[in-house]
Image (cartoon, coloured by chain):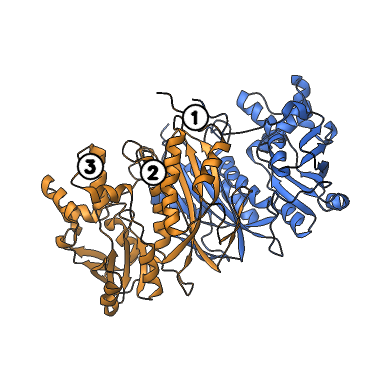
Chain colours: A orange, B blue
């Protein structure tokens, strides 16, 4: 089969212009100069995430539109977790041999879909040939009204710990896809892996309501990320299986594995994890219907709760499993 | 030889903290949360550049400190070309197998040297394993006093075209290094390739003085970049060999190649190229001792001048030569 490759940087830029508007109310100068010029509020939050082939995704089961979508979604999630609204992003795109125009058209279409949902401009970036497909996105955002951002460091003893979004589901999807197992009965798990939902609206509500005292997004699994939120503090967790997604329960039942451990280890959940004063917890759960309380912060370090003994300090780490970490 | 690899993401973050201060006057929240929070002027300019092994550099002749330095320098150059001052940057770092702590300590030291010179904070970023070493930096900056940025699009017929910095020198360095030829007699050429000078002060002066009518940085060579600056306009160029660096002249003499063509093709010069009203050109050259006038903008399209017939629409393009562009 003869594929028509994207022929030049110029052709690439035309493809980008076809998918992403070049003007936006936040842009004083759009793509095409040495820099873009952005109209800024007094404070912005900024995050950078890599999304690399055979580390964060595989071309064998990610469609090109999924790769484009998820590369941006994981970045948007960092903005959402600050209780902020994304304002713009720039794109470093690494292009391997052999991918044709149809591939990149779909890739950009997937990314542009999320941009349209969020009214988010692509301000520019860089293109390079590379051995594997890779994306590096830097994204910035503005705080909900008032200009404050939600950070990881506001948890206090006695606070309730809340979660917005399912956990462990993307891990189920990843296991199925890596095995090449049939996944017809696990559509939500596969979607959680390939096209994670971003929770910008929920993050903004949690911030502007003044209810959340701390927040982060779950990317490495609750077992790794909850200690990051707690810092020197500890927690008592009461998480029961009736809180877990039916697909995760079905998956674990069939394989004889522990649903709670699978959920706690998780990875790439992109759920919002945060804390709230205990007396405000019910109000928070009314405001965000997907939110639920999974435990309480305590002064004494460590995390206690069903399933935690087995997962302590484990989790999902793209980096630790890499070959270069061996001597 | 047994090398000690950098063992975990945590170790990496400690290495970064050892080289880059975590507090800075422009940072409301530094590294370690989902996002950094930045204090912004009303407008910032933003740019992203990739710096990838075997595309933009080779480990065989770039020392680790050169890689760290240049990865940031090429980004700073984009800010300088807007007449702006860099305010901060974020780092996507792709880490291949087999590089040890000493390598990354030197890599970060090279990058941190430029940060110290420019009082520039590293606000955060992302780490990932990868097949090859790669850097993706996003950098932002503020305009010189007044809040205006210098763009590519201000050239008018009759304007003088100026250049700040030598051209073609990095190309000489690249040729020597790629051949493995002795380079003792070409120290400036090798330095231009490995450790390009950034021209932030000159860019700020050119902007705040109000003299320059347009500006960009030369990354792909004058033959490719001057048409980008001119847009629909043309130019008459009077560039003579006495304007070229002695090392470039020596290199071309020995090889029987044309010094003017070598200089015009150039690549990775990171010189500032811009335009100025003709009557202000002398004042600009007084203000910036390295600046010189190389021609005049004209209404009629196309570029005329010694050497231009041979280089028209050629230049240095990391992308066009990539294997993926072939069918």
User: Can residue A209 be seen in this snapshot?
Assistant: yes
The 10 Å Cα crowd at callout 2, few under 14, some 14 to 19, many 20 or more, is many
The 10 Å Cα crowd at callout 3, few under 14, some 14 to 19, many 20 or more, is some
Q: Secondary structure at mark 3?
A: helix
Instruction: Estimate the x, y position of residue B207 in percent, counting from the top left.
Output: 74, 56
Give the distance between the C-alpha atoms of the residues marked 2 and 1, in whole angstroms.
20 Å
Between circles 2 and 3, the one closer to the viewer is 2
Q: Residue at x 24, y 64 (%)?
A: A303
Q: Read off the chain for label 2.
A: A
Q: Which residue is mark 1?
A: B324
Q: Which residue is mark 2?
A: A65
User: Can residue B6 be seen in this snapshot?
Assistant: no
Instruction: Estimate the x, y position of residue B53 in percent, counting from the top left.
Output: 52, 35
Q: Are marks 2 and 3 on the same chain?
A: yes
Instruction: Estimate the x, y position of residue B313 in percent, counting from the top left.
Output: 69, 31
Q: Is residue B179 left or right of residue B91?
A: right
Q: Are marks 3 and 1 on the same chain?
A: no
Vertical order, A280 against B274 (above or below): below
Q: Which residue is mark 3?
A: A176
Q: Residue at x 78, y 53 (%)?
A: B212
Q: Is residue B260 left or right of residue A311?
A: right
- Count of picture labels: 3
Give the distance between the C-alpha atoms of the residues marked 3 and 1, in whole angstroms.
31 Å
Vertical order, B71 against B306 (above or below): below
């Amino acid at each position: 089969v003869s594929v028509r490759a994207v022929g030049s940087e110029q052709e690439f830029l035309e493809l980008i212009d076809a998918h992403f508007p070049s003007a936006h109310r936040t842009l004083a100068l759009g793509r095409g100069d040495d820099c873009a010029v952005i109209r800024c509020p007094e404070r912005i939050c900024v995050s950078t995430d890599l999304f690399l082939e055979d580390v964060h995704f595989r071309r064998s089961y990610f469609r090109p539109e999924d790769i484009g979508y998820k590369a941006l979604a994981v970045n948007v999630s960092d903005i959402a977790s600050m209780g902020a609204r994304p304002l713009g992003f720039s794109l470093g795109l690494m292009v391997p041999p052999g991918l044709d125009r149809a591939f990149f058209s779909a890739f950009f279409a997937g990314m542009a879909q999320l941009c349209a949902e969020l009214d988010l401009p692509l301000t520019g970036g860089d293109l390079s040939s590379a051995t594997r497909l890779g994306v590096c996105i830097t994204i910035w955002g503005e705080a909900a009204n008032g200009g404050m951002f939600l950070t990881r460091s506001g948890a206090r003893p006695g606070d309730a710990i809340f979660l917005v979004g399912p956990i462990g589901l993307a891990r189920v999807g990843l296991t199925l896809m890596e095995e090449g197992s049939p996944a017809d009965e696990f559509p939500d798990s596969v979607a959680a892996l390939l096209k994670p939902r971003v929770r910008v609206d929920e993050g903004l509500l949690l911030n502007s309501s003044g209810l959340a005292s701390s927040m982060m997004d779950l990317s490495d699994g609750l077992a790794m990320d909850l200690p990051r939120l707690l810092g020197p503090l500890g927690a008592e967790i009461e998480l029961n299986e009736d809180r877990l997604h039916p697909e995760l329960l079905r998956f674990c039942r069939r394989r004889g594995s522990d649903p709670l451990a699978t959920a706690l280890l998780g990875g790439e959940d992109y759920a919002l994890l945060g804390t709230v004063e205990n007396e405000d917890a019910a109000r928070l759960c009314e405001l965000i219907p997907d939110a639920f309380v999974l435990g309480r912060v305590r002064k004494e370090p460590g995390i206690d709760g069903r399933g935690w003994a087995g997962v302590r300090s484990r989790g999902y780490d793209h980096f630790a499993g890499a070959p270069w970490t061996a001597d």
